[in-house]
Image (cartoon, rainbow, N blue to C red):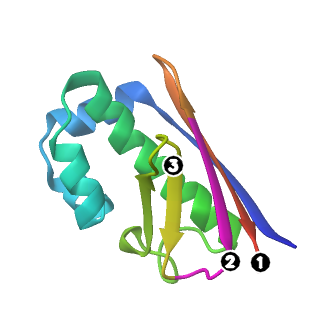
Amino acid sequence: MIKGVGIDSIEVERVKKIVAKGDSFAEKVLTPKEFAQYQKMKGKRKVEYLGGRFSLKESFSKAMGTGLGKYVGFQDVETLWDDLGHPVMTSTKFDGNIFPSITHDNHEIITFVVLEEK
């Protein structure tokens, strides 16, 4: 049974400005494993990764019906890749199946998350 659906978007230009300021935002938003991946990236890929992970966390919190903040925090949601390069999302706040999707172009990063109860 579907518990929730969340969608979010963020402008690439906004993320570029954040990345240019240093790692403080990334350290706040990304889990240690996500941050380790982020540190290996450069340029456009780094922007896409940070923006994508931020947006996925927003989408997840919307699917939960809470938004980011008191119940769901940045460190409660993690998205890594499987062996085929697909995003795999886990959370300490949800025990069911999580289906994330992410797309981006030169202007926008868009994410979508579906939560399914077990």
Sequence-wise, the earlier of marks 1 and 3 is 3
Sequence-wise, the earlier of marks 1 and 2 is 2
Q: Which mark is residue 95?
A: none
Under circle 1, the secondary element is loop
Q: Main secondary structure of the magenta part?
A: strand
Residue on which the image places disc 3: 87
Question: In this rendering, would 9 be left or right of 29?
Answer: right
Q: Quadrant of the C terminus?
A: bottom right
Residue ID at (30%, 56%): 34
Q: Is residue 22 above or below residue 59?
A: above
Residue on which the image places disc 1: 117
The answer to whether residue 118 is seen in the rendering is yes
Identify the amino acid type marked 1: Glu
Q: Is residue 69 above or below residue 34?
A: below
Q: Are marks 1 and 2 in contact (CB under 8 Å)?
A: yes
Residue ID at (62%, 82%): 95
**Image quadrant assignment for residue 93:** bottom right
Q: Quadrant of the N terminus?
A: bottom right
Q: Position of residue 26 (x, y in %)?
A: 24, 52
Q: Disc 3 to disc 2, how far (Cα)?
A: 16 Å
Q: Which mark is residue 96?
A: 2
Identify the amino acid type marked 2: Gly
Question: In this rendering, would 70 be left or right of 96?
Answer: left
Report the magenta residues as a range.
93-102
96 falls in the magenta region: yes
105 falls in the magenta region: no
